Image (spheres, rainbow, N blue to C red):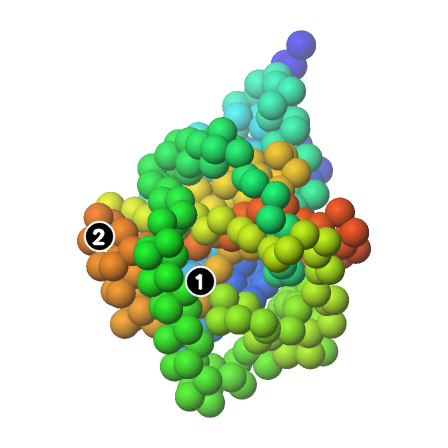
Amino acid sequence: MMTTTHLEHDTFRAALALAARAPSVHNTQPWSWRMGDSTLQLYADPSRQLMHTDPDGRDLILSCGAALHHLRIAARGLGWDSVVHRLPNPDDPDHLAAVEFHAAEPTIAALRLSQAISDRRTDRRRYTSWEVPAAHVSALAAAAAECGVVVRDIEDSWARAQLVHAFERAAWQHTRDFGYGAELSRWSGRHAATVGVPARSAVAATDATTRPFADPGLPQAVLRDTEGADRMLLLATAGDDRLSRLRAGEATSAILLTATMFGMATCPLTEPLEVPATRAEIRDQVIGDSGFPQMIIRIGWAATSSEPLAPTPRRPLDEYVHRL
């Protein structure tokens, strides 16, 4: 039986190392943690904002939300439940969360979800045409709903066509932005070390849903069936403030980890949501003005013949974890 009431220093660091496995825009890892005796404080790091890709900082907050959810799942797997106070300091908008912990025996489900943190990869390759069971989609939507986020399964052919069109328009606009292209090159390919998208994680763009990272070195999947298929899940929130975006990031993590636990391949996508015009188009034409689109997640089944994906790099813990 557990009698400890406070996390030990090494347990904090183990949970934070797993939290850092969260996906972030261009793998910028734009978070900072401050460690107290019994709490962790999450801060956004505005110095890591992508000014051309993410001019309003929405992707940055989503990334931090994913790290927050990863932290909670990691802590639960280590035997600690958490209570989160979101945006606890109105005078400091970069202070995103204060997290308290309480000892609790981990369940089998908690351990499986925690293991999914290490197993998860962003898979940008084509997926097979194997059907995604409706029960899986329902489970993913339920995981997001626990974070207060609505999931739309974009399976209607007209809505899917509108979404793809938004990808195409956003990609076209980005090709005309020299600053965006320079930023993309700086955060991918040969320049990726402890941050960024390395060549081994990027595929050559085959359509507008694949962002053209620099020096793609990941071979495209060879599919044995007629052609690949995937499902697109669109995450939307009732509001579009900082809290809504933080919760959308948490829901992104919840979906990715749940899908990984099912053995599915996943890829978060944000490019058409980074351009105001295409984001407005998606809100109006794809989800009927019923919320604010925050994230698109492609899900499906990877080809069994595909090579396992290597983990993307992460910064050393001491670069973003500090004592209070």
Q: Are marks 2 and 1 in contact (CB under 8 Å)?
A: no
Image quarter in which the N terminus is found: top right
Mark 2 Cα shell of 10 Å, populated few (<14), some (14-19), many (≥20)? few
Q: Position of residue 69 (x, y in %)?
A: 50, 41
Disc 2 versus disc 1: distance between alpha carbons?
Answer: 19 Å
**Residue in front for this viewpoint, 14 or 193:** 193
The residue that disc 1 covers is 270
- Foreground mark, 2 or 1, reads 2
Q: Is residue 156 above or below residue 58?
A: above
Q: Is residue 108 above or below residue 10?
A: above
Task: Write the residue at 51% across / 63% down.
Answer: 25
Q: Is residue 102 visible?
A: yes
Mark 1 Cα shell of 10 Å, populated few (<14), some (14-19), many (≥20)? many
The residue that disc 2 covers is 288
Q: Amino acid at mark 2?
A: Gly
Q: Does residue 271 appear left or right of residue 20 in this picture?
A: left
Q: Amino acid at mark 1?
A: Thr
Task: Write the residue at 70% across / 43% down.
Answer: 119
In the image, which disc is placed on residue 59? none
Q: Is residue 265 visible?
A: no
Q: Position of residue 302 (x, y in %)?
A: 67, 49
Q: Does residue 142 appear left or right of residue 69 in this picture?
A: left
Residue at disc 1, secondary structure: loop
Residue at disc 2, secondary structure: loop
Q: Is residue 26 above or below residue 262?
A: below
Task: Write the residue at 62% across / 69% down.
Answer: 196
